[in-house]
Amino acid sequence: MNDDASLGLSFGLLIVLLILSAFFASTETALVSLNRYRLRHRARAGYRPAQLAEKLLERPDRLMGLILLGNNIVNIWAAALVTVISIRIGGESAIFIGTMILTVVLLIFVEVAPKTIAALHPSRLALPAAIIYYPLLKIAYPFVWLINLMANSLLWVLGVRVDHGRKDSLSTAELRSVVGESSPLLPKRYKRMLLSILDLDDITVDDIMVPRQDIVGIDLDEPWEANLSIIQDSRYTRLPVFRGDIDNVEGLIRLKSIYPDLIEGSLTAQSLLKHLQEANFVPEGTPLNKQLVNFQSVNERFSFIVDEYGDVQGLITSEDLVREIVGELSTDPSPTIPEVDQQDDGCFIVDAGANVRQLNSLMNWELPTNGPKTLNGLIIELLETIPTIGTNITIADYSIEIIETAEHSIRKVKVSASDMLQQSKTLSAEDI
């Protein structure tokens, strides 16, 4: 009876040891698998288990030392207990069988199954475990310190330096991947806005500027009646003022400042110059994130883009930059929105001077953006000449037909998707 009771007690103690081993194994995986940024958010919100877990993970060598110390002690005791139980049941010949059974039990019920659960649901195990590990680390600190001293010394000899002050951080590309994979939790429009903000470093002012040929302004060398008509019909709040050519910029005029004179009919070229504001210039190739800072620093919403020779290449406004981040703010026609007219056959008549990036954003197209900034430039770069009316070309699975040209540029094109290609001979980019 005493032997049976002793054997039953041994089995009970063995089960307790196996449960403890499963606890150490699973919580180790759970703590390592925690999302550090979600953990940091919950810790800053005042959730005590998250705060304890964050403190433990600040020194992962100590945490791992504690877990492995407890896990190895429990497994050694379990192995010794199995040996005793095996001898009592079947003698020394049963030790091998008992060891094999313990190995299978440890592998399935202590390692694989608990660690799989921990990897799938790390927070459910790691945060409660942190409440246990934090005071346990205080108690066992001398042993853990000694273990870490020897382990870190060995790592130092091998050339590995343990950086206790390391903080997790994400690169822009990694953060873009995080946002991209958060679609179930994040509305699509917010996701697009966040991705657009992250892309500001890769996009330059050249990508979204209004090209110089599309700039509407006041030419002081023109008759005043023509300039007055431009002011009255303008859809802009600011207009550039120049002499003869846009490269000879005199400054900017805020239409709001000249409205009183305009209403009274007393507006003249001389009175207009009194309200002239200094123009702001930025070099081409300036990243949008830097341009955003430029707008904030000069408290201005309008900048001219110049090349290395000082010639104006285009202009950019704060509205253009905001539109790049959040998309169109309304359905009202805007002078900066590409002119696209859908036809009855499903094709689109497009202004060839339209910006490629804006076309892609507006129409959900995938025209290449790593070359010329406008559709006109993209076509001319591929053909290496000004095409004649009726020429067809295929770019990124889009069939483009030239329907209107000028002396030095393409005015209008007809765009259709790849499944709408016409039966006539098509010139592809590979044939050029």
Image (tube, helix red, strand yellow):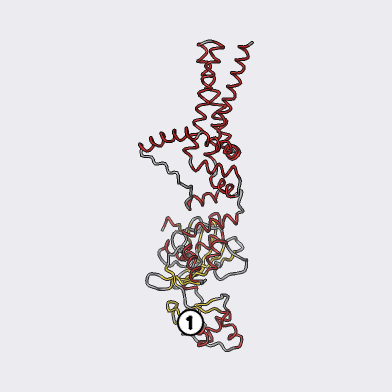
Secondary structure beneath dot 1 equals: strand
Q: Residue at x 37, y 72 (%)?
A: 309
Task: Choose top left, top right, bottom left or bottom right for residue 246.
Answer: bottom left
Q: Is residue 160 left or right of residue 86?
A: left
- Compare residues 154 and 269 and report the one nearer the observer: 154
Residue plotted at (52% across, 39% down)? 32
Q: Residues within 10 Å of mark 1 (few under 14, many from 20)?
A: many
Q: Quadrant of the C terminus?
A: bottom left
53 versus 352 height, above or below: above
Dividing the picture into quadrants, the one containing residue 22 is top right
Q: Is residue 12 above or below residue 354?
A: above
Q: Residue furthest bottom?
A: 266
Question: What is the three-letter code of the residue carrying label 1?
Answer: Asp
Labels in figure, total: 1
Quadrant holding the N terminus: top right
Q: Position of residue 385 (x, y in %)?
A: 41, 66
Q: Position of residue 376 (x, y in %)?
A: 47, 66
Q: Which of the pair 121/319 is nearer the observer?
A: 121
Along the viewing direction, whichever of 13 and 265 lies nearer the viewer: 13
Q: Answer above or below: position of 368 versus 311.
A: above
Residue placed furthest toward the right = 1
Is any part of residue 308 visible from this angle? yes
Q: Which residue is mark 1?
A: 219
In the foreground, 403 or 310: 310
The spot of residue 319 in percent (x, y) is: 55, 68
